[in-house]
Each structure stands twice: as C-alpha cells, then as structure tokens.
Amino acid sequence: MKRRAAVEPVIGHLKAEHRMGRNYLAHRMGDAINAILAAVGYNFRLLRRFIA
C-alpha cells in the first residue's frame, strides 16, 4: 500500500502536466511513443530542477 501511495501522485502528475490523459497518436506505436515522450518530459523536468 505504501508503494501505491508513492506511485499514484506521479501518475496523476503525468496525466495533468504531460498530456497522458488522452493519447492523440494512433495504434500501438503511438501508445509507446506517447509513454516515452511523457517519461522524457518528466525526467527532463526533474533534471532541470536538480541543476537549478
């Protein structure tokens, strides 16, 4: 339960800030690209915050 409590806010943040709520790309490849781009954006934001 503790692990789920740690993961849920991250998923909510990805949906709100990185356009994971609705996928506008088609098919399985679009799903994969959408997930990868959201992860890249999330990690880039963390990296920017770490450098600053």
Image (tube, grey):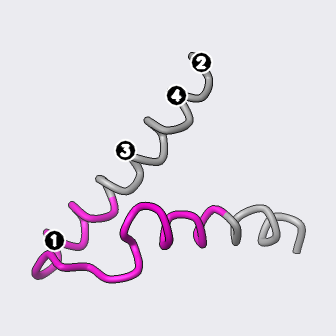
The magenta segment:
10-35
Which residue is under mark 3?
Answer: 40
Q: Earlier in the sequence, mark 3 or mark 1?
A: 1
Which residue is at a point 37% across and 56% down the rendered structure image? 38
Which residue is under mark 4?
Answer: 47
Q: Earlier in the sequence, mark 2 or mark 1?
A: 1
Quote the CA–CA distance across marks 4 and 2: 9 Å
Q: Earlier in the sequence, mark 1 or mark 4?
A: 1
Label 2's element? Answer: loop
Whether 19 is among the magenta residues is: yes
Q: Pointer 4: residues within 10 angstroms few (<14), some, or many (20+)?
A: few
Which residue is under mark 1?
Answer: 30
- Residue type indicated by callout 3: Val
Residue 8 image point, x, y percent: 70, 72
Label 3's element? Answer: helix
Quote the CA–CA distance across marks 2 and 3: 18 Å
Q: In the rendered view, does 1 fall on the left or right side of 28?
A: right
- Residue type indicated by callout 1: Gly
Q: So how many labels did they put on this image? A: 4
Give the quadrant of the N terminus: bottom right
Residue 37 image point, x, y percent: 29, 53
Which residue is at a point 60% across and 72% down the rendered structure image? 12
Residue 30 image point, x, y percent: 15, 71
Label 4's element? Answer: helix
- Residue type indicated by callout 2: Ala
Q: In the rendered view, does 43 fall on the left or right side of 52?
A: left
Which residue is under mark 2?
Answer: 52
Closer to the eye: label 2 or 1: 2
Which residue is at a point 58% across and 64% down the rendered structure image? 13
Residue 36 image point, x, y percent: 31, 54
